[in-house]
Image: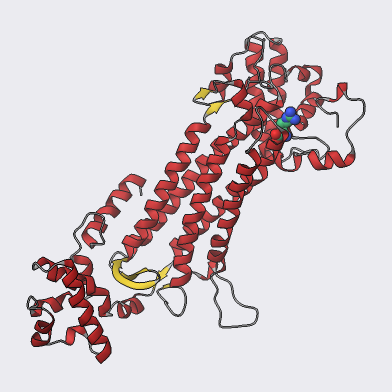
Amino acid sequence: MKKLWGSRFEKSTSKLADQFSFSISYDKRLAKYDVLGSMAHAAMLGKRGIIDKKDAAKIVSGLKTIGAKIEKGTFRFDAKAEDIHTNIQTELKKLIGPAADKLHTARSRNDQIALDVKMYCLAELTEILDLTVGLQKSVLKFAEKNVDVIIPAYTHLQAAQVVVLAHHMLAYVEMLERDKGRLMDSFMRTDAMPLGSCALSGTSLPTDRNFVAKQLGFLQVTRNSIDSVSDRDFLVETLSALAMMGMHFSRMAEDFIIWSTSEFNFINIDWSLCTGSSIMPHKKNPDILELVRGETGTLYNNLNRVLVLVKGLPLTYNRDLQLDKPPLFESVDKVKLILQLLTNLFETLKVKRDILTKRIQDESFFTVDLMEYLIKKGVSYRDAHDTIGKMVKDCLDKGQKISGLSKQELKKYSEKFEMDALKLLNAETSVRIKKSFGSTSPELVKEQIKGWKKALGA
Ligand code: ARG
């Protein structure tokens, strides 16, 4: 296929050079945005009298035809085209003839690719935001369905204290809310229209960049033509937000992987998200969650790829920048899939209430509550810690339950103890007496659920 730049070249590029440099195999994903951008550009050229109005109309209508084919999936991408810009330009010429040659007036592929990728990012960020809200809603629904369930919570993966399951679930909702904030941040800074910056310096032709921005729904135009064709911050920011989401996905996945083991046995992951073993017939493996955890590496890697790619590039455009797209596309695709899979997970997840009820009988979960009992009676934190520490050690040594201690035995540890201290030794009380804002008290958690439902329109 004829190159957009071939006229001053003494010979054509080698087959290997083409094979190495062509981007059509992946930037064809930008086709829709390339067409929309060109339509707005052509309309502007006509309106400003830079090209003939009739030619502009011809271009727009030709692009419309191409756009419809792309939308329907019937557009035939040409592997011999250098990139998506060349492919569409050539197709347009076939369709409308010489008028097509006027489309590339007052622009370059440098600002064109920046525009295409920005439009792609804006559309995908919007979709990812929607999917994230969907996931938050399904977490919330799961939390509400199991609002009376109490679970052990861990530090260092050692059993620590009991919490309301819904409280743990709302931690995920918080994480996802911050993820949305980062996506929106990224959206906001991406939302500036670069087309019309041309190769790097702008143009002497009387263009109207604001018109193009308005047509394409951008909030503003970029202010500096050099920055416009060089900047890939917006893409790095998106990849960074997606990498952080991956970090959260993998932590959620890990919680559920652990909880689904026969050792923990707190939950049942739906069959539809597990696979079996080819040799051990009894196995039900949480492969999907393991892959969610694993793909986090991909998301980090893609961020790193573009950071390294852009580092040290001299202003302005350099062809290296072409390589920003495969990692971007991959991360966007992965995150969208994971968001849907995790939504399915929460919709189908079952809690093993009987097992949890048994597990939270362990009195060592309530040692902090006993400490606070003494603190409320004027004992210092340090002394309370020592006292309860001794008590726990003795009980463990003797294989005795704390709740089985007599009044005299209790008094031996601290004069401040009365028998009512033993009423603290159960999970329901332990969560109920928490008071601080943000704590696991069921009342406070229910309030939080209410707030989230309102905020998410659930
Ligand atoms: N395929 C190129 C990219 O993705 C498009 C811009 C090419 N510009 C150039 N001057 N060679 O970045």
Q: Does residue 302 lie above or below 265 as drawn?
A: above
> Which residue is nearer to you in this view: 375 or 72?
375
Q: Quadrant of residue 55?
A: top right
Q: Quadrant of residue 209?
A: top right
Place of residue 47 in the rendered image (x, y in percent of width and height, measured from the top left): 62, 11
Q: Is residue 422 visible?
A: yes
Residue farthest along the right direction in this orientation: 11
**Image quadrant occupied by the N terminus:** top right
Q: How many marks?
A: 0
Q: Quadrant of residue 418?
A: bottom left
Q: Does residue 80 lie above or below 143 as drawn?
A: above
> Which residue is nearer to you in this view: 314 or 249?
314
Place of residue 188 in the rendered image (x, y in percent of width and height, measured from the top left): 47, 33
Residue found at x 81% / y 40%: 79
- Point out the quarter of the image occupied by ligand 1: top right
Place of residue 237 in the rendered image (x, y in percent of width and height, measured from the top left): 53, 40
Residue found at x 45% / y 42%: 182
Q: Is residue 69 visible?
A: no
